[in-house]
Amino acid sequence: MRSSAAQEALERGQRAASKPALFSRQNIITVLALLAACLALPGSAAAADLFDPIGPVLAAQAWHLVRVTLIGVFVVTPPLVLIVFVIWRYRIGGSSSSYWPTWEFNGFYETAIWAGPLVVVGFLGIWLVSSTVELDPYAPLPGADPLRIDLVGLDDKWLALYPDERVAALNEIVLPVGRPVTFRITSDTVMQSFLPQGFAGQIYLMPGMVTELNLAASEPGEGKAIQTQYNGSGFANQRVPMRAVSEADFETWVTSASGEPLTADRYPTLISSGKSVEEFQMTKAALMPLADDCLFERVVARYHQNAQIPVAAQPGSPTYDPEAAPLPAGACGALLPEGFTPGGMAMGSGMAKPMAGAEMPGTHSVGAHNAGVMSAERMSGSE
């Protein structure tokens, strides 16, 4: 009986030994080999990112992150070291510790405890202020003849307008190396977030408002224009190529524009309805001539007409109809309210006139109502 039980125990031990352990040498080598292979792969693994920037703005932001991290290490390291020291010094049976029952204050220790946090807060405060001023997205970068790009965020695509070159790029952004770039950005749907990965940090965009972002490319490379705002089905897939090329290649790219010119009448057909967005499919990149000098202003002016936008005319709504969503007509200078500046009057940049949709005492907010309709319809199918 005893020998039978011993035999069963031996067999169980052999079966357990035959199964590979989770942290066996073989598994560890396999995982390390897979990680090395992923790092060696070209493509997205080698794309520009925070620690491999292709522009001076993101390079400065990366250094700011490193600097703050090092300060954090300076704060965290002493407690971690002291924990080990205290455990060892005051261990059971140790002879190096002493007992001070009447101890209550030590000036050296108090100074050391409070000096560290004060120094850290001082350094962080100084560097935060300097970095905030240095990395102001509205501040133009040094250099002559900046490239102007007007970017419109839609539910499932980015539309980049180049007014000086008179071309419009759908789901692709191309920049010349060594030339400052000034973006004017708005949304023709719900609130979005634009992240030019590899070039600069994230910035928000809202319908009826204009934000600015200044950046540049210091070397050729490719990043991504990513929509990072959680605002509905497929939002995470809204990422398109953003390339930095030589000046000659940029000119060649501009001259390759073909097809039907983009006009205010054609623009509504580029917009997807809310139902089609739920089954997200990235639209193929296209470069077309731009026939309207103030198409960007017309998109912004859609939300400054002092009238509620019908659901069928609202981009992103399930019943969106291009025929019912014409852009405002008129001269470029008369499209937006007087005093309208980048940043939007609702952000505190001088409300000379009540902005269409602004919440005023005792009135109904048209803009807030439309945004609520868009958000409710859009988020009903959110991920």
Image (cartoon, grey):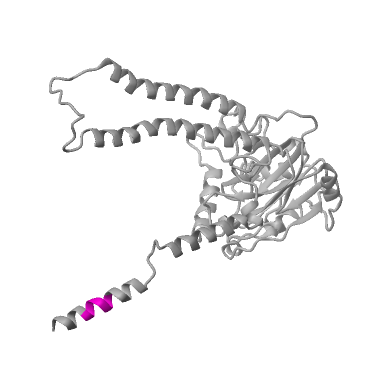
The answer to which of 131 and 264 lies nearer the viewer is 131
Q: Is residue 232 left or right of residue 339?
A: left
Of residue 329 and residue 344, the one placed in the foreground of this image is 344
Residue 335 percent location from the top left of the image: 72, 39
In the figure, is residue 318 to the left or right of 16?
A: right
Q: What is the magenta segment's predominant secondary structure?
A: helix
Q: Quadrant of residue 14?
A: bottom left
Q: Position of residue 295 (x, y in %)?
A: 75, 45
Does residue 367 show up magenta in the picture?
A: no
Residue 370 visible from this viewpoint: yes
Query: Among all residues in the image, which is located at the extreme front?
Result: 3
Per the rendered image, the range of residues in magenta is: 7-12
Give the residue drawn at x 79%, y 51%: 263
Please count the marks in the image. 0
Find residue 292 and report its horizontal and vertical position in percent.
80, 46
Give the residue at x 61% y 33%: 60
Residue toward you, 314 or 3: 3
Residue 143 drawn above or below residue 309:
above
Indicate the quadrant where residue 260 lies.
bottom right
Picture residue at 77% right of the left edge, 40% below the top: 177
Q: Observer-nearest residue: 150 or 13?
A: 13
Q: Seen in the image, is 150 located left or right of residue 134?
A: right
Q: Residue 297: percent from the left, percent from the top? A: 72, 41
Q: Is residue 155 visible?
A: no
Q: Looking at the rendering, in which quadrant would you find the N terminus?
A: bottom left
**Seen from this angle, which residue lies furthest top?**
107
Above/below status of 291 relative to 382 = above
* Corner quadrant of residue 237: bottom right
Picture layout, residue 183 above or below residue 32: above
